[in-house]
Image: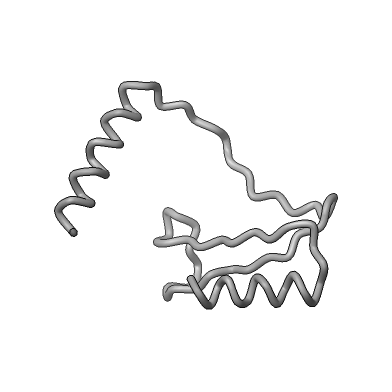
Amino acid sequence: MQTAQRVAAAAEAAFAPDGITLFQANGAAGGQTVFHFHLHVLPRHTGDGVALAWPRKEPGAQALQTYAAQLQAALQATA
């Protein structure tokens, strides 16, 4: 993440964007097309037409609680 911060800061200095989008995908189902780790640093300007959008799906409170418990257990198992 230090490299990402450094590249993002350089992009801000070089291109004076209105914002920065950091994008990383894992696995084909996650949208990955080049199968090694890479992080996209996208300088963004208001009205640039770039859209990273997908339909929002609300899982509901019970499902969110289940997901939180599963993540908590996985974090504790890898600590």
Residue found at the very far left of the displayed protein: 77
Residue drawn at 73 percent across, 57 percent down: 19
Answer with left or right where residue 72 lies relative to residue 6. left
Residue drawn at 64 percent across, 50 percent down: 52
State how many labels appear.
Answer: 0
Q: Nearer the viewer, residue 11 or 40?
A: 11
Q: Quadrant of residue 59?
A: top left
Seen in the picture, residue 40 relative to 56 is either above or below; the reply is: below
Could you say where residue 66 lies in the image, as x and y percent from the top left?
Answer: 26, 31
Residue found at the very far top of the displayed protein: 61
Answer with left or right where residue 11 lies relative to residue 15. left
Could you say where residue 25 lies in the image, as x and y percent from the top left?
Answer: 47, 61
Seen in the picture, residue 38 relative to 56 is either above or below; the reply is: below
Residue drawn at 32 percent across, 27 percent down: 63
Residue drawn at 23 percent across, 36 percent down: 69
Could you say where residue 35 lies in the image, as x and y percent from the top left?
Answer: 43, 73
Q: Quadrant of the C terminus?
A: bottom left
Answer with left or right where residue 9 lies relative to residue 35. right
Q: Nearer the viewer, residue 31 or 52?
A: 52
Answer with left or right where residue 42 lies relative to residue 13. left
Could you say where residue 45 lies in the image, as x and y percent from the top left?
Answer: 81, 57
Q: Quadrant of residue 73?
A: top left
Seen in the picture, residue 56 relative to 74 is either above or below; the reply is: above
